[in-house]
Structures are given as C-alpha cells and as structure tokens.
Amino acid sequence: GTDVSCNIGGAAAFANDFSRLGWTFSKPAIGTVSVCPAGVTTCSFTQLEEVGVAVFGAGSGEGLPAGSGRSVFVVRLDTGEKLAEFPSGGGNVDAGCSGEGNLITADMVGDVSCFSTFPGTFISRCFLGDAAGRLWRLEIGDPGTPNWNLTLFYDPYASFNPVPDPDAEIRSP
C-alpha cells in the first residue's frame, strides 16, 4: 500500500506564535525567497538559503481577540516555521502615509500576489488588500528577514472629497 501521511510540520511549526491568525479564506502566494540564517540582517553569499514560502494575510478577526486578522505572515513550506510576521503596531509595518503610523486598522483578507524583479528569480515583493479596500506592499527581497517590511501602498479613500452637488438644496424636502 501507499503510505499517505499529512505534513504537519516539525517542532518549528508549533514553536511559532500564530495568535493573530484569524478566519482565513484568501488565497496565499507560494514562491521562493533567498534568506540568511535566522535573525541575521546580512550574510555572505555562501550562507544564503533558498526557501519555499507561503505568504498570506491573517484573515478576518471577527469574533476573535483584539488584533486577530491584522497581520501578514511569511511561512516556510518545508517546516511550517514562521519566517516573518507583520503585525499591527509592529516595527516592520508602515502606514504613515495615512496618518496611522504603524497600525493596520483593517483585517488583512485579500488574496496575495507576489512578484520577482526578473522572471525565474526569487520573489521580492507582494501585494495584498485589507477589508477597508486599501492595498499593501510587502518587501521581502532582502536576504535578511529583519529587513523585510509591510507598507501601505495605496489608499483609495485618503484623498476622497465628494464633489458638492449644487442642486442639493433644490431637491431637499
């Protein structure tokens, strides 16, 4: 017979804190990154490791503890180890263009799309949307995972000024 077993990850998968993970339903992005050994910001070319990853938003935090759903994860596919997390309020999150500092104020529910600088190379950046309709950019091209960051890329409502209707008083009852 064929041995069919599930890959539940190693001990590394269970040593991670996924407490901000909400009800996820978006499609993750799968790709390969080049990383230095754990926690190192720079390393030599010979120390780099090619790693398959899944990139996904934390999903909906509805009905869950505060902060659930307001994060982005990068997880190794071979071990389940969390390589990086980008939580609301984290030092690797920047929503400054909206005046929100480093806060993610809406659940990260959108599908993730990742790209490489050149075809056939490692993924270097990903994009995903939040429940407020904003687009976020995740920079993961640097081999040092502490150098990765999540930035608010586009907020369609930041410059929204409804055009006043000159006939509004005429139509009012």
Image (cartoon, grey):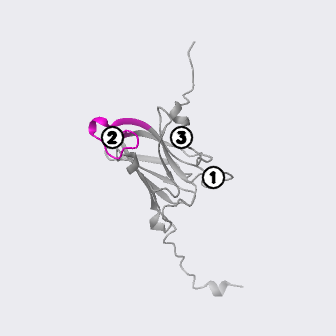
**Residue 121 - label:** 2
Q: Nearer the viewer, residue 13 or 154?
A: 13
Q: Is residue 72 left or right of residue 46?
A: right
Position above or below: 168 against 110 = below
In front: label 1 or label 2:
1
What residue is pinned by disc 1?
61
Task: Give the residues drawn in magenta, as a range.
Answer: 33-52
The numbered mark, 1 or 2, whose residue comes first in the sequence reads: 1
Let me know if residue 34 is in the magenta part.
Answer: yes
Name the side, left or right, on which 40 lies relative to 98. left
Cα separation, mark 1 vs mark 2, equals 34 Å
The correct choice, above or below, for 122 with respect to 96 in the image is: above
Q: Callout 2: few (<14), some (14-19), or many (20+) C-alpha neighbours within 10 Å? A: few
User: Pointer 1: residues within 10 angstroms few (<14), some, or many (20+)?
Assistant: many
N-terminal-most mark, 3 or 1: 3
Residue at (63%, 46%) from the top-left corner? 23
Secondary structure under tag 1 reads loop
Q: Position of residue 134 (x, y in %)?
A: 51, 60
Return the residue at label 3.
Answer: 16
Going by the numbered disc 2, the residue's amino acid type is Thr
- Dot 2 or dot 3: first in sequence order is 3
